[in-house]
Amino acid sequence: MTKNKPLVSIITPVYNDKEFILKTLQKFEQLQLPGMRKEIIFVDDFSTDGSRQILKKLQKKYKKKYKFIFHKKNLGLGMALKSGFQLAKGNYIVRQDVDLEYDVFDIYYLLKPLLKNQADIVYGSRTLNNNNKYSTISYYLGGRLLNFIFNLLYFNNISDFITASKLFKKEVIDSIEIESYGFEVESELTAKALKLGYKIINLPIAFKPRNFKQGKKIRWHHAFRIIKSLIYYRFA
């Protein structure tokens, strides 16, 4: 029976991404997950560019097919993920950005280690794929520096902890209480998962970066909050 098939919840935060919403929805429709069911959850973090209106229309059209969360004020990425995680019913939880930098069709490939119980968490690593390009050299180098600091603090060898391509078994998400509001949620999720003993593996993925003119939101100053969070959760 269909209801006995494992459920995959895909959490998609949205903040001023109106040009990507319908394209992403189309890819979700096309995504094949053999032997599994899909639960799509859009979380609008109080967009002001028209994204909210698009999602409201989609909610009316697809009320029984997709789930929608609308924040009453802008809270940040961490809280958007938290809202989505709390609503998710899936056996497996996927974090998938709406801007299509990460390929929706990689989800099935990334799920396989979880389905085979080879890991508790899978990170889609941009740096393991040598064909990937980045929006700027400073963005690339900054990411590598953050990753070096992470591995130094946590005695680990994760290749890309700030990736937005993260997949979890449901019990992992249930055991982590998210406190971070912004991009530092990447530090918190990984740090807490490791301290709880969960196994994380990295798999190479394709990455198509957008630049700041196209709406990329993370900036250099966010690195300081990410590092502060890394240190806090290492010793807290």
Image: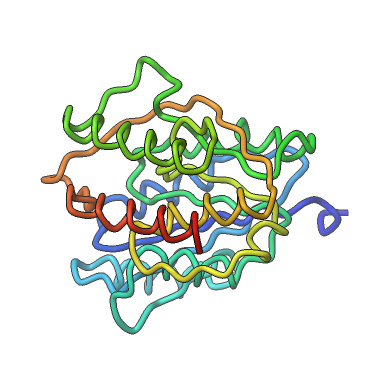
Where's residue 129, x and y in %? 42, 19
Residue ID at (43%, 41%) = 150
Residue at 70% over, 33% down:
112
What is the basis of the colouring in this image? rainbow
Q: Is residue 96 left or right of residue 94?
A: left
Residue drawn at (16%, 45%) of the image: 214
153 in relation to 106, above or below: below
For the N terminus, the quadrant is bottom right
The answer to whether residue 28 is left or right of residue 1 is left
Image height check: is 195 above or below 78? above
Residue 130 position, x and y percent, is 38, 15
Tell which of 131 and 225 is nearer to you: 225
- In the image: residue 63, left or right of residue 160: right
Residue 51 falls in which quadrant of the image?
Answer: bottom left
Image quadrant in which you'd find residue 121: top right
Which of the two residues, 207 or 2, is positioned nearer the viewer here? 207
Camera-side residue of 174 and 66? 174
Residue at image x 44%, y 36%? 152
Q: Is residue 140 left or right of residue 230?
A: left
In the image, residue 232 above or below residue 219: below
Q: Residue furthest bottom?
A: 72
- Extreme-left residue of the structure: 213
**Number of residue marks:** 0
Check the image and name the residue furthest to the front. 235
Between 230 and 187, the one nearer to me in the picture? 230
Residue 4 position, x and y percent, is: 86, 55
